[in-house]
């Protein structure tokens, strides 16, 4: 292995090029185009699986047992405690390490001071910075800089701004076989991985969710037709200039004020009916027959089961597990080598950017629940304030009699003075570890469910007045911080048809809105509870309560005017509950349909996710026909429980929350990397519930290049400060020794995977953020060096090139064999 500074080279087009080369760079003509365009027509046959005639996937290999045993041994091996208590390197006493470091930092400061006047000094210093090994080198570099002050040319672009340097030290690997496994195993693994990526692309395109552009480009080379990409093909908006400010323009009017139902889009008169758990839309509301049904595709149940079974077989295939494990280990090692070679260059690039630092770049809390978005002290102060301000307000009905706030607390023998953070007892502690039931009980202030209903519910006797006030205070704190944003989760349970109207009425009438906040709607997987209480007759009734109001307001916005306004700020759906609960049913073709699911057992995770995805897909196509924005699926996935949750998440979800179990599934982790599936991780939450902080895989995921972001989950239970997201970043940085570049990369990832609009992201990340590679990055906005973005992009391209080239090479060998047998020329080959 050697390191060198390599010039950009065009990618060879021959499929016979050496496999696994790390030197190639994708030529500009192969990069994705950033221009937004209209979504191409969807598949006409719902649920038709993607067909590839080039190869047949055979998961059976003769080495299954051996490699499966190896992979399992690798993952069950515990981490040995290191006896090393000091750094693994020592300097002799006569080495002037302190003097050398002091002079290095002094030179660094001098470079920073001179950059505005003499930018070429910085460019030259950055190129030589990593070569400094001695005091003599320092002196030589200083002399060179003094010469450059008088004679060095000024390198600037057309606008007069400093040219950003993107050249960095790359690692090259020589040799014929670079992947670490025999070619036959590489071929078997590559075909399985490609097949899995095609499955995800199919479901993302069908539901109008986004799919990684770089991965799609490589997959397109193997497919027989262009892949259908969804990259923010929203209603055309005014383009954002490259020198536009980082703050989007703020509307002077409140989005919920002055909205007349008469001015809303007209009723199109469609009819609705749920059939086998999926909503069907008809052109006539009074005549709902097959010949009047709109062509709104959704995945066929049988095709979904087939694809899921294929994925399950893939993740336990021995050679594939071994191959993916080795690639993940290689990605970790390659990142460590990149840091050794380029860390100082990345730091210098960040210091060169005026004004921008970690504190004033955009960060999105991509996973946070509205009912716990405040910290304990905030909630305590609000309760005390409410007791003093509204003591005589009736807040609860008990046996048909109204209770005032004062009477509620008197029944508990409490006064405002008695309350404290310890009295509230809402913080997760050591007793909640692996006890989700105890954690849920922490949502009750002072252990009283009546206080939870009064203060942190949207649907209560006072119509969520107190909860609206406290959420607006949290929004005010976010607006004051200016650069922090959140995607709050609100619950829809599916117990009654009017839940959506009540939730929308709460948001609109209390004006619960902020430019810093977007909503996701979470659906708790609690059908068994509702069925036991006879609140629901079957699972289809729950699905109807969740989705029919959304179809009704899409067809006729005037029928639910407040819901129409509220949905403009909802970006997607979440599925929540304790994943560690045992599942007593396996989802297959013998599973009862939603109308027939009348038993009191809860449906499995994949059952919930499929029917949420299928109805969301139909809804998205209908909303696109009407010119409305679409939704995405971003469930809790992989926090605990069986691995197959992550299989469903990979197939159906644009991004997921948690993803801890990926550390035990190398094939899925590698697939999540190749597809760049977003993972919102919450280490402090996991530390109290399922996984100790030092065992959290976030730093490992980050080093390998997975699309991860930091989120808070439940500040009420896990955080202490007024800025829980900054608290999360702070602790992660201290424990895992993250660099400034790492922190900014996490923040940039959070914006990319968030549900904020394309226009807003143009301001936050730059107008080219949807492009590929370093062209997508604007360091003046993200504070992420182009070096880091280029490294991530090139590494992803190399991995995709490795697997796609293996498949193409087998295809070429097959053609050559047929040619030698037939002794006849193949059309198109000379």
Image (tube, helix red, strand yellow):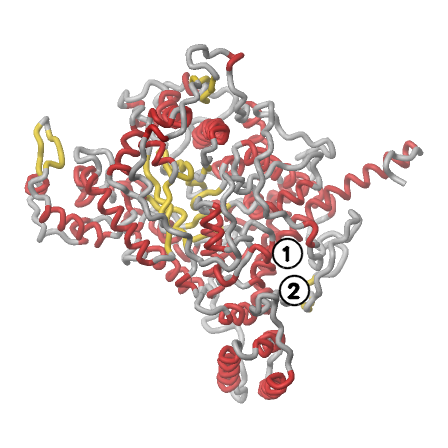
Tell me where residue 462 sits by quadrant: top left
**Helix, strand or loop status at disc 2:** strand
Residue 291, image x, y percentages = 53, 12
Residue shown at the point (33%, 44%) measured from the top left: 369
For residue 655, which numbered disc appears in the image?
Answer: none
- Disc 2 crowd, CA 10 A, few/some/many (<14, 14-19, 20+): many
Residue shown at the point (66%, 35%) measured from the top left: 59
For marks 1 and 2, the one nearer the N-term is 2
Q: Does the CB distance between marks 1 and 2 fall below 8 Å?
A: yes
For residue 170, which numbered disc appears in the image?
Answer: 2
For residue 794, which numbered disc appears in the image?
Answer: 1
**Helix, strand or loop status at disc 1:** helix
Residue 454, image x, y percentages = 18, 39
Q: Nearer the viewer, residue 604 or 554?
A: 554
In 3D space, how far apart are the residues under numbered discs 1 and 2 (Cα atoms)?
10 Å
Residue shown at the point (57%, 24%) measured from the top left: 46
Q: The N terminus appears in which quarter of the rendering?
A: bottom right
Q: Nearer the viewer, residue 147 or 527?
A: 147
Residue 35, image x, y percentages = 59, 46
The answer to whether residue 140 of the structure is visible from this angle is: no
Identify whether 167 is placed above or below 807: below
Please give left or right for residue 400 compared with residue 669 in the image. left
Residue 496, image x, y percentages = 30, 24
Residue shown at the point (39%, 46%) measured from the top left: 367
How many numbered discs, if any?
2
Tell me where residue 806 sits by quadrant: top right
Tell me where residue 92 sits by quadrant: bottom right
Q: Nearer the viewer, residue 577 or 793?
A: 793
The answer to whether residue 299 of the structure is visible from this angle is: yes
């Amino acid at each position: 292995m050697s390191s060198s500074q390599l010039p950009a080279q065009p990618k060879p087009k021959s499929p016979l090029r050496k496999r696994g080369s790390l030197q190639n760079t994708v030529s500009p003509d192969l990069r994705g185009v950033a221009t937004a365009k209209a979504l191409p027509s969807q598949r006409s046959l719902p649920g038709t699986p993607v067909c590839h005639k080039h190869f047949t996937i055979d998961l059976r290999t003769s080495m299954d047992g051996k490699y499966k045993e190896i992979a399992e041994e690798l993952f069950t091996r515990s981490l040995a405690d290191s006896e090393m208590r000091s750094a693994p390197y020592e300097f002799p006493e006569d080495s002037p390490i302190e003097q050398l470091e002091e002079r290095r930092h002094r030179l660094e400061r001098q470079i920073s001071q001179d950059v505005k006047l003499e930018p070429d000094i910085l460019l030259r210093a950055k190129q030589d910075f990593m070569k400094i090994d001695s005091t003599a080198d320092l002196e030589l570099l200083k002399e060179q800089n003094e010469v450059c002050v008088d004679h060095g040319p000024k390198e600037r672009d057309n606008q007069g701004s400093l040219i950003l340097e993107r050249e960095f030290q790359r690692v090259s690997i020589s040799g014929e076989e670079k992947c670490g496994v025999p070619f036959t195993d590489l071929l078997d693994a590559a075909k399985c991985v490609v097949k899995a990526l095609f499955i995800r692309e199919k479901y993302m395109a069908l539901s109008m969710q986004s799919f990684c552009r770089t991965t799609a480009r490589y997959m397109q080379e193997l497919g027989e037709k262009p892949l259908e990409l969804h990259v923010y093909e929203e209603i055309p908006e005014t383009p954002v200039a490259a020198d536009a400010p980082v703050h989007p323009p703020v509307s002077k009017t409140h989005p919920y004020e002055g909205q007349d139902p008469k001015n809303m889009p007209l009723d199109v008169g469609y009819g609705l009916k749920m059939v086998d758990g999926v909503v069907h839309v008809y052109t006539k509301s009074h005549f709902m027959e097959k010949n009047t049904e709109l062509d709104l595709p959704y995945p066929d149940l049988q095709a979904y089961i087939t694809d899921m079974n294929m994925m399950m077989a893939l993740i336990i295939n021995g050679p594939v597990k071994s191959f993916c494990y080795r690639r993940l280990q290689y990605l970790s090692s390659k990142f460590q080598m990149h840091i050794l070679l380029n860390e100082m260059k990345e730091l210098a690039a960040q210091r060169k950017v005026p004004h921008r630092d970690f504190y004033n770049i955009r960060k999105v809390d991509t996973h946070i629940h509205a009912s716990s978005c405040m910290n304990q002290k905030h909630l305590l102060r609000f309760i005390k304030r409410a007791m003093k301000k509204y003591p005589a307000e009736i807040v609860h009905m008990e046996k048909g009699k109204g209770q005032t706030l004062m009477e509620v607390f008197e029944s508990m023998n409490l006064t405002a003075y008695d309350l404290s953070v310890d009295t509230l007892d809402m913080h997760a502690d050591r007793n909640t570890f692996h006890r989700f039931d105890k954690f849920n009980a922490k949502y009750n202030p002072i252990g009283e469910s009546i206080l939870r209903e009064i203060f942190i519910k949207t649907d209560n006797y006072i119509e969520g007045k107190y909860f609206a006030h406290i959420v607006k205070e949290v929004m005010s704190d976010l607006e004051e911080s200016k650069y922090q944003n959140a995607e709050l989760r609100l619950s829809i349970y599916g117990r009654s048809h009017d839940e959506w109207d009540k939730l929308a009425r709460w948001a609109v009438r209390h004006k619960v809105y902020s430019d810093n906040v977007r909503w996701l709607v979470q659906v708790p997987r609690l059908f068994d509870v509702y069925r036991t209480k006879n609140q629901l007759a079957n699972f289809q009734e729950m699905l109807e309560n969740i989705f029919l109001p959304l179809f009704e307001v899409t067809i006729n916005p005037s029928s639910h005017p407040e819901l129409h306004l509220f949905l403009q700020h909802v970006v997607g759906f979440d599925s929540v509950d304790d994943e560690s609960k045992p599942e007593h049913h396996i989802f297959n073709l013998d599973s009862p349909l939603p109308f027939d699911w009348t038993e009191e057992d809860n449906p499995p995770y994949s059952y919930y996710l499929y029917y949420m995805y299928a109805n969301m897909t139909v809804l998205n196509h209908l909303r696109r026909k009407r010119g409305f924005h679409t939704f995405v699926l971003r469930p809790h996935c992989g926090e605990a429980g069986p691995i197959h949750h992550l299989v469903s998440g990979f197939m159906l979800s644009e991004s997921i929350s948690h993803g801890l179990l990926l550390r035990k599934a190398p094939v899925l982790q590698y697939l999540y990397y190749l597809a760049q599936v977003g993972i919102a991780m919450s280490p402090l939450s996991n530390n109290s519930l399922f996984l100790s902080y030092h065992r959290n895989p976030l730093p490992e995921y980050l080093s390998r290049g997975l699309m991860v972001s930091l989120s808070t989950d439940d500040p009420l239970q896990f955080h202490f400060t007024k800025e829980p997201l900054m608290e999360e970043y702070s602790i992660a940085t201290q424990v895992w020794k993250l660099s400034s570049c790492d922190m900014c990369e996490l923040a940039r990832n959070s914006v990319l995977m968030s549900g904020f609009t394309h226009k807003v992201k143009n301001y936050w990340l730059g107008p080219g953020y949807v492009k590929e590679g370093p062209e997508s990055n604007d360091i003046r906005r993200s504070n992420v060096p182009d070096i880091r973005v280029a490294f991530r992009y090139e590494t992803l391209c190399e991995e995709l090139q490795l697997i796609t080239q293996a498949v193409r090479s087998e295809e070429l060998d097959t053609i050559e064999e047929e040619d030698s047998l037939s002794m006849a020329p193949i059309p198109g080959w000379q």
